[in-house]
Image (cartoon, rainbow, N blue to C red):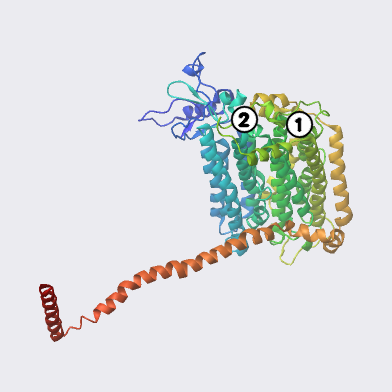
Amino acid sequence: MQVGAGPSSGEHAEPVRPVEMITTLWQWATVDKAYTPDAGSAAAIPGTPIGELTTEVRPFSIPVVLRLDPLTAIMLAIITCVGLLVAIYSVGYLHDDPGYTRFFTLFAMFVFSMSMLVAASNFLIVYVFWEAVGACSYLLIGFWFQKPEAARAAKKAFLVNRIGDFGLAIAVFLLWMTYGTLDFHDTLSANGTILPGILGQTRLADAAGMIGGAVGTAICLLLLLAACGKSAQMPLHVWLPDAMEGPTPASALIHAATMVTAGIYLVARCAPLFIASPGALVMVSIVGATTALVAALVATVQYDLKRVLAYSTISQLGYMFASLGTGTMLGFTAAIFHLLTHACFKALLFLGAGSVMHAMGGVIDMRRYGGLRRLMPITAATFLCGACALAGVAPFAGFFSKDEILATLHSKAWPNTHGQQQSPATGHAHLHLSSFSSDAVADDLTADALIGLDALNCPDVWRILFFMALITAGLTAFYTFRAVFMTFTGPTRVPAEAHHAHESPLVMTLPLMILATASLVLGWLLFSTHWLSHFLSATPSFALPAFGQTATAPVFHLDLAIQGTLAAAVGIVVAAIGHLGRRSDGPQMERFLGPLGALFANQFFFDQIYTVLVVRPLELLAMLAGIIDRFLVDGLVDFIASLPLGIGSVVRRLQSGVLQRYALAGVMGMLLIVFVLAWQLRG
């Protein structure tokens, strides 16, 4: 494995000393040197020839190189910090579980796979650890495999994610065929020339180096499909709510810091590819905003506390996708900002739900308990901090990150309001994109499809997306505080399964307090200092010259902050009117929503639709294949096998074992031969 840039070791390499290891890691972590040749190399000398930007396929070699840039650093910070707190929490949560050792084995594999995914500098290595993350999630979701529900949920998550994984595999193949490499960044050849990577500085310096048209759009749509699978976006979102069957620490790990962030990272890392395909870019926002609204509506009628948080995760990830799809530097920064704050407060909420579940004897139905603030004051206080951050209440972290996303969408819907220049993704003319090849002319259907996708990138569409995001903000506040009021307010009620309801031990409440503090101060700290936007601007994937046209410092938009705050306030007030101190909201919600209640409670019938359109046809196909295999294939094989037996049974009658019959047969044969010869001689 090669770490960073530098000469490889000799055949008889000595063991790496600690000082050398520290020096290597320091070089690996130096962003300025990570993507440029060494000062003494031939490539650094002016006039050194640079590899041409062609689609010629080079010899297939996959170096395992780890690169650290600002985007990777942010992702590693989220994965490791949140992962550490979840690990500490798990010590108390699973201390009596017989699978304690197995859980931490899977936990470590999960964190390692995700860390390698975000640190890899090659699409093939990303794909390898993309699959590893999926395999670990399958094992964690099905951790209690003795439960049929857990086994089914694990299988469902694995199969749904295979659809997205297939999209990533095809995208990697197309990237290799299109660019002739799978490396993210420029590499140095043996003769001192620079081989341009897909996202390298050499290619980004020339807008024509990025492939647009039908091929570029196809690659980006396949990458979007992969991101939808891992980040649970429509229509591949159905696996995530069922993943609640796993242990709560696994839910916090999967839904806050690791697996669901992989799709966001993939789109952000491939920003230049999406910028070159405006039609695919706007689809990212459409998918994200639609998912955010639909998931928020479903969350309003859930009674399982962990399922409320699961649909909340889907909705908040939709926010991030909507921001990424704007194609501006502010949009990408806002998405990563919300990803960072969301990791803190969503991990806090999941761990708080686990604390409630731990005290209630495994019961997670909010209708069966209430008033738990008296029994669990620390859990209640920290859960309230996470709820305020999720609802976007000032000055909690979610308020600032969500305001940035709303501002990004607003700037696309009303471009002149914020004084921003139009993003480079508004049309092909801004990038002067090259096609795949001069003779690869798209047919009329493909051209019409590209024109149709590009037509979606207009202010009217962005205004719809903005209002969808604003409505989602109000719904988020409603279902979040509905859960708070049903769980922690009202008369104290505990289920029969909770024999000794009490506050969780310190090993579980300490991570809650740390995450609550981060949920309170992190948003203001990052927003007021503008540190995150400056830090992310050094990411090579954001080095596209056209990107610089949209690079503006984050500004506090009072009008949007007021709109977002009013939406959150309305949601909180409605939740308080309907649920503050009440024992149950079942009949009340059903009467209020009417037929929509059944629609929301059944998750817009996505599972039923998939059952009718996918599961049942596959079952019929499997049944037909079984019939063909049993009667046609096996029948033909059995018939062929029976032929020698039939012939043998006929011939066997001639082998009676009686010598007189053998002699008679011999005489008759000789007479027959004599007769035939005589007949021929006579003629």
Horizontal placement of 419 versus 622: left or right?
right
Count the marks: how many?
A: 2
Q: Is residue 318 above or below residue 658?
A: above
Q: Nearer the viewer, residue 439 or 123?
A: 439
Question: For mark 2, what is the residue?
Answer: 541
Q: Is residue 15 above or below residue 446?
A: above
Q: Is residue 20 visible?
A: yes
Q: Nearer the viewer, residue 596 or 301?
A: 596
Q: Which mark is residue 479?
A: none
In three-dimensional space, the C-alpha distance between marks 1 and 2, rounded to whole angstroms, equals: 22 Å
Q: Secondary structure at mark 1?
A: helix
Position in image of residue 670 (x %, y %): 11, 78
Residue 616: name its quadrant.
Answer: bottom right
Q: Is residue 514 visible?
A: no
Q: Nearer the viewer, residue 226 or 138?
A: 226
Position in image of residue 503 (x %, y %): 73, 54
Residue 520: name its quadrant.
Answer: top right
User: Which-is-in-front pick, marks 1 and 2?
Assistant: 2
- Which residue is most to the top? 46
- Residue for point 71% across, 42% down: 342
Q: Secondary structure at mark 2?
A: helix
Q: Residues within 10 Å of mark 1 (few under 14, many from 20)?
A: some
Q: Which mark is residue 527?
A: 1
Position in image of residue 17 (x %, y %): 44, 29
Is there CB contact under 8 Å for labels 1 and 2? no
Q: Is residue 98 above or below residue 636?
A: above
Under mark 1, the amino acid is Phe
Position in image of residue 572 (x %, y %): 85, 48
> Along the polypeptide, which appears first: circle 1 or circle 2?
1
Q: Nearer the viewer, residue 641 or 589?
A: 641
Residue 245: name its quadrant.
Answer: bottom right
Under mark 2, the amino acid is Ser
